Image (spheres, rainbow, N blue to C red):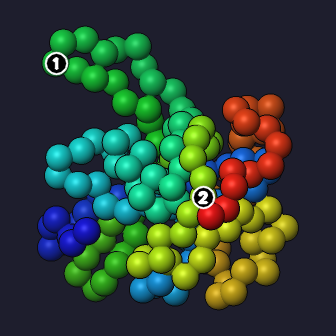
Amino acid sequence: MAHIHEKIDFTVAIFVVHDRKVLLIHHRRLDKWLPLGGHIELDEDPEAAALREAKEESGLDVELIGERPPTTEPGTRALIAPRFLEIHRITDTHEHIGMIYWARPTNGRVSLAGVEHHAIRWCSAGGLDTLQPPMSNAVKWYCRKALEEIPECQTRNAGRPPTMV
């Protein structure tokens, strides 16, 4: 999606964890290993964007992990809070405010979005240091934190990662 504003956009990053591995994509245009994610569109909230991006980029339905306050009432809908927020520079004049979510797969088969990515793979904590091209330290930190905070007992479908297509 094109940038919504010339100076700043809101984005989501989804670290999907299953069987002590995190799902990563090798982004075609950026030539980087990243989590699933992308821009929040004008007609959606961050939660909807995270679920949409995960499905579009991996073929998986996911469940976001986090707390939803019990405050939904007419005119207000509580959202699952992102685990982290960050701001990162894209160009000299443009930044992204990133909402970082943890998630686990609930349904589907992993498939490569070939137009956007060179590769998609499940990666263990030990494999993060061997990725080529090397992953940024920030993304690596989030991967390790997600793997640490989502123990196997919390994964809905323990065992093998969802099938690769």
Give the foreground label among 1 and 2. 2
Q: Answer above or below: position of 54 versus 79.
A: below
Residue 2 sits above or below residue 55 on the image: below
Q: Position of residue 69 (x, y in %)?
A: 42, 20
Count of numbered marks: 2
Residue at 41% x, 78% y is: 115
Q: Is residue 164 left or right of residue 85?
A: right
Position of residue 127 measured from the top left corner of the image (x, y, whole percent): 80, 71
Quadrant of the frame with the C terminus: bottom right
State the residue at coordinates (21%, 70%). Answer: 3
Q: Position of residue 75 (x, y in %)?
A: 16, 18
- Answer with mark 1 or mark 2, whichever residue precedes in sequence: 1
Provide the residue designation for mark 1.
75
Residue 99 in sight here: no
Tell me if residue 125 can be seen.
Answer: yes
Local crowd size for mark 2, using a 10 Å CA cut-off: few (<14), some (14–19), many (≥20)? many
Query: Residue drawn at (33%, 66%), measured in percent from left and top?
Result: 96
Q: Write the residue at 60% across / 53% down.
A: 109
Amino acid carrying mark 1 in the image: Gly
**Residue that numbered label 2 is attached to:** 110
Position in image of residue 42 (x %, y %)? 17, 52
Position of residue 49 in the picture relative to residue 13 (left or right): left
67 in relation to 105, above or below: above
Horizontal side, residue 53 vs residue 136: left or right: left
Q: Where 79 falls versus 118 (above or below)?
A: above
Q: Quadrant of residue 154?
A: top right
Q: What SS does tag 1 mark?
A: loop
Res 158 quadrant in image: top right
Q: Amino acid at mark 2?
A: Val
| Mark 2 residue element | loop
Indicate which disc residue 8 carries. none
Distance Cα–Cα, label 1 vs label 2 = 36 Å
